[in-house]
Amino acid sequence: MIVYPVSKISFPSPKLLFLRRMSQKKVRVRFAPSPTGGLHLGGVRTVLFNYLFARHHGGEFVLRIEDTDQTRFVPGAEEYIMECLRWCGLEADEGPHKGGPYAPYRQSERKELYRRYAEQLVEAGHAYYAFDTPEELEAMREVEKAKGNYAPQYNQAVRGIMRNSLSLGAAEVKDLLEKGAPHVIRIRMPEQEEVRFTDMIRGEVSFQANTVDDKVLLKADGMPTYHLAVVVDDYLMKITHAFRGEEWLPSAPVHILLWKYLGWEADMPQWAHLPLILKPDGNGKLSKRDGDRLGFPVYAMNWTDPKTGELTKGFRENGFLPEAFVNMLAMLGWNDGSGQEIFSMEELIEKFSIGRVHKGGAKFDYEKAKWFNHQYILKTPDDKLAALFQPVLQEKGITADAAYVARIAGLVKERCHFVNEIWDHGFFFFAKPEKYDVDAVKPKWSAEKQAFFEAWMTVLEGLDDFSFAPVEESFKQLAAAKGIKPGELQLPFRIMLCGGKFGPPVFAIAETLGKKETIERMKLALAAFTV
RNA sequence: GCCGCGUUGGUCAAUCGGCUAAGACGCCUCCCUUUCACGGAGGAAUGACGGGUUCGACUCCCGUACGCGGUACCA
């Protein structure tokens, strides 16, 4: 225990408390998804912040699968989540995939563990058995609603009239338990108590405990609910900092009380409730529906629902580089204050601080996401880009030399937002044009121009060095000799090689195509232009 | 309804009481380039509202409005 001079610091700042804690314990964080479907962009960001925080502090990052709801279990979802983390380069140090000192990491495999803590709470008077059937619960809600109660809760107002170990006699409870009557265990929220805590992002947050209902802790099937499971597992797994979405803020008092009632208050993690990622138009949480509607991915990778077969698009399959995806997510709610936007993973780890995370939600901007990807395409070496592009070529039945593809990638990458767009800006490197944009040539075409190209072909035939500069030089010289402005000839030349008004600088195209191919294309085009 | 959390340009956002309010995306104009981009130079565009506190408020406090989240034997 560190003692601070009270005269100096009467009110230890959250930052100070934080630093104090920091020096005491090894940082351990966790990402705890439930395997119910595709991994949302917001989920990946939560992983990222966990990961960055852990690495920044030399701590550990745990993956825990929260599969306590058997009815919502979706086969394949867990493997999918792990593949997402692998793709993003955000793999956990411990988890179901590689074990660890606190295994098992799937809550369904830890089922037996939770009951004793729930029972402990009952014994201490902080929780109670409830025997109400779903029908009885429903009836209570109907009655309450009829009284004008908008959203009826199982709380101090009604727990006295429901069937539970608070309202029933001890003998009856014992009897029910012995007969194996189905029951749940609920927390008994205090009548008069303010629960307050310091959120690492929001600062001081407080709630009146009686505004939260008596949450179920242990379900009738013996599984814990999220509320019990997070607390027990965070404790058992020695989690020091807990990051989660803002949607958890309202139930935070339940968790804090649980830490207290279980006698673990001193070990409670520091909480950080992350802001939400909002839809670009209007307001509200970004959902996969918005992606479908607006035409961009929301999940990290393609996800196919095993039940319906419905496919939801992912960033990976849409051509995003993982580094770009991660960088973009990091900037959604965090920045280092310098204005820098492009960060390598190493820089993110070095500079990340939870204190600089925004409080408010951020609308997702797909245009900005594309810009990030473009930046990373620019940074990616040509040979690597070519390797990423090969599958696209294969799909089209084209085989091409790796070095040739790399050269093309280098030539066109500055106009690509995605790897597959190398095709859109460089397809003509792989086949002669099938048709020409004659409308762009014909109106200004002339016998003089025709003569120029015929003469130039002969010059080109004789060139030993067919690279950019000599080709351009011979072009300019001949144009000058013929008294034609080079600019008027460049566009026709481009169309001869590419078929249209696109592509990188013309002489670079000629150089890449090579002498033989360039002249062949010129001949073909000249024939087409004069027809 | 109740509880909680938010609110700086169209979007992401800096600012931790001194602001003539950065920067980026997008948009517009120009230059470069007789394709498109990249690059360069400019431009339009912002503190929800009302009260305090203060020499001074985008920054602190209180209201209001608006938005979002929660209000399950889901997470």
Image (tube, rainbow, N blue to C red):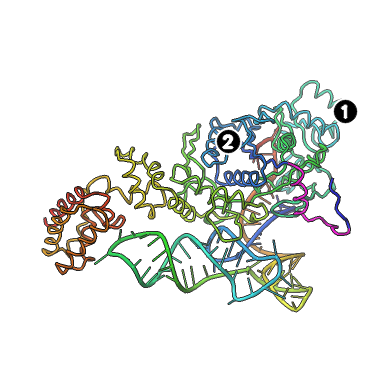
Question: Between tags 2 and 1, which lies in front?
Answer: 2
Residue that badge 2 annotates: A36
Which numbered disc, 2 or 1, marks the residue that appears first in the sequence? 2
Residue A504 at x, y percent in the picture: 31, 56
In terms of depth relative to the viewer, which is nearer, A4 or A391?
A4
Q: Residue A170 shows which numbered tag?
A: 1
Can residue A41 be seen here? The reply is: yes
Residue type, mark 2 in image:
Thr
Residue A15 at x, y percent in the picture: 75, 54
Residue type, mark 1 in image:
Ala
Residue A247 drawn above or below residue A491: above
Residue A122 at x, y percent in the picture: 83, 32
Subunit ID for the residue under disc 2: A
Subunit ID for the residue under disc 1: A
Q: Residue A61 shows which numbered tag?
A: none
Image quadrant in which the N terminus of chain A is located: top right
Q: Residue at x 29, y 37 (%)?
A: A397
Q: Secondary structure at mark 1?
A: helix
Residue A166 drawn above or below residue A431: above
Give yes or no for contact between labels 2 and 1 (Cβ–Cβ under 8 Å). no
Image quadrant in which the C terminus of chain A is located: bottom left
